[in-house]
Image: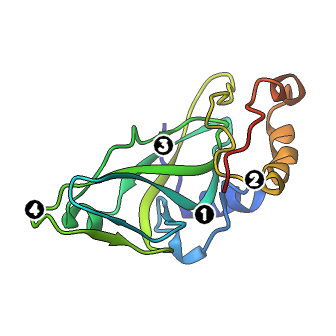
Amino acid sequence: MCILGKDKLVNLIEQFRIVYPYDYHLLDGDSYVLTVKEETTLNYLEHQNLISYEIVFTPPELVAHLTAKSKFGRMGLSFLNAAKVHSGFVGRLALEIVNLSNDRKPITIKRGDPFMHIEFITREGEPSPYLGPYQFQYLTKEERQMYTPILKKVFQDYDSLEGKWPKKLHAQ
């Protein structure tokens, strides 16, 4: 296992849209920094799911891990994610957070704020795409269709798997 560096990430972004859309300036050497889709304010002890602006696709030979930007941890946000993105997953990520700030004041995360590092890590073994209920979460029909050719390219048995993926699209 190894964490992919910037040059590998750029190659995979261009080839497979592992992060879409992407901003070259949000590549930080060994990860990509995901941003927030909508401005959100959390009151003290409030839990919310923030949705990433970017779509993430994890190719079959990779898994991804999430780590929080320390700026938000210092403000008092606690991150509840299991912090793993399975091989074959396509969708926007729900970033689970709670406000535990010592001063008990609301914390606002603005749309487009750099929020969470995603590190892509190589994996070994037979490809096994994610088939769970969150596949294609928060994608429009058009975005889902944009990934169909990519999934067909990386999963040779895509047609037999397609019926196992959720039909319902989560609203964007």
Of 68 and 6, the residue lying toward us:
68
Q: Earlier in the sequence, mark 3 or mark 2?
A: 3
Residue under pointer 1: 7
Q: Circle 2: is it few (<14), some (14-19), or many (20+) Cα within 10 Å?
A: some
Residue at the spot of label 4: 102
Horizontal and vertical percent position of residue 159: 89, 28
SS at circle 2: helix
Earlier-in-chain disc, 1 versus 2: 1
Check if mark 3's residue and mark 2's residue have beta carbons within 8 Å. no
- Residue plotted at (81% across, 51% down): 141
Q: Position of residue 25 (x, y in %)?
A: 54, 77
Q: The C terminus is located in which quarter?
A: bottom right
Question: Are the residues flagged by discs 4 and 3 in contact, CB closer than 8 Å?
Answer: no
Q: What label does residue 2 carry, if any? A: 3
Foreground mark, 1 or 4, reads 4
Q: Residue shown at 67%/36% (left/top)? A: 88
Task: Tell which tag, 4 or 2, sits nearer the viewer.
Answer: 4
- Looking at the rendered structure, the kind of residue marked 1 is Asp
Horizontally, residue 143 falls left or right of residue 149, namely left
Name the residue tied to disc 2: 16
Q: Report the amino acid beneath label 2.
A: Phe
Q: Position of residue 106 (x, y in %)?
A: 24, 68
Residue 26 is situated, as x and y percent measured from the top left of the image, at 51, 72
Q: CA distance from mark 4 to mark 3?
A: 37 Å
Is residue 10 rendered to the left or right of residue 65? right
Q: Residues within 10 Å of mark 3 (few under 14, many from 20)?
A: few
Q: Nearer the viewer, mark 3 or mark 2?
A: 2
Mark 3 lies on a secondary structure that is loop
* Camera-side mark, 4 or 3: 4
Q: Of label 1 and label 4, which has the lower sequence position? A: 1
Q: Secondary structure at mark 4?
A: loop
